[in-house]
Amino acid sequence: MDKKSCLVIMSDIHSNIVALNRALEYLKVQGMENPRKMVCLGDVIGYGPKPKECVDIARTFGVCLSGNHESYLQGDFDKRRVNPKALEVIEYTKKVLGEDDLNWLTGLPPNQTITIPKTGNTIAFTHYAPGVSDGYVESKDDTLTAFGGISENVSVTFTGHTHKPAMAAVDAKGHPHYYTADDLKKYFGWDKPILLEPDQRYIVNVGSIGQPRDGDERLSLVMYDMAEHSIRWFRTDYNIEKTVEQMEEAKLPESLRERLLQGL
Ligand SMILES: [Fe+2]
């Protein structure tokens, strides 16, 4: 992978500044610290203790989308379907953020598509997987449904929302393939480039920076080499205890702290 042709795609930061800073520290070592080449697929805020610090950084990114937690800020949700603890943190977030940051968050777009001039590949960014209820693609069946909601010219759709790294693909014969986080680890390994096939279409779930839920509490992000058409997941530890401490100081619900420690 060539750092000059790489985009860094992350999602679900969830006000976890310790995890976000750890990710940026790693990217700096890799020579990939240019924020204009960074993408956040939504849920910058929610669950975590440091919304302001995370928003300040996300505002410098080349692309930042809206997730469900950004819609909660506007009251745009069905109360029966949202975890009350999440809404408790939304109230905290509203108190901590100023009007300018709140306006920025509520004005974010839900998706974005770009075509890479040199290769002609079109890639899409979105918080939720398209076409499936609640935006979760977690099986081969979901894979076909999701591709039904994606325009044929899009070769890779990057998503977040589930907080679990995963990859879905449909091959040239229209057959679906689905890789869970465990499959990705087993077949490809973290931190190794995966060359994408030119005749296949993909949905790549980048995982979560601030609240991973695949049973591995380490943060997750993806690099996409636009020239090579390859992806690479990166996962690393960060100081979770520090984030838990900050959550305690902010008096955020205890169950959310437990969840973070367990990676669930
Ligand atoms: Fe999220």
Image (tube, grey):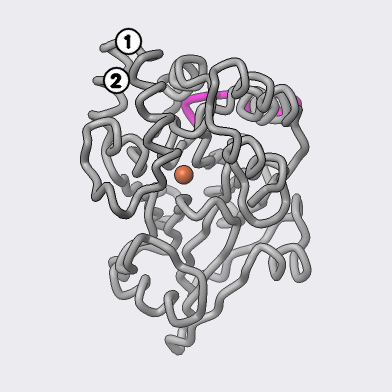
- Residue placed most toward the observer, 144 or 123: 144
In this picture, is 134 found above or below 31? below
Assign a secondary structure to mark 2.
helix
Residue shown at the point (31%, 70%) measured from the top left: 152
Quadrant in which residue 229 is drawn: bottom right
The residue labelled by disc 1 is 98
- Residue placed most toward the observer, 144 or 137: 137
Question: How far apart are the two marked residues, 1 and 2, measured between alpha carbons?
Answer: 6 Å
Q: Is residue 153 left or right of residue 20?
A: left
Q: Is residue 96 left or right of residue 71?
A: right
- x, y (%) of residue 201? 45, 70
The residue labelled by disc 2 is 102
Q: Which residues are magenta?
A: 29-38
Assign a secondary structure to mark 1.
loop
- x, y (%) of residue 172? 46, 83
Mark 1 packing: few (<14 Cα in 10 Å), some, or many (20+)? few
Mark 2 packing: few (<14 Cα in 10 Å), some, or many (20+)? some
- Residue placed most toward the observer, 29 or 98: 98
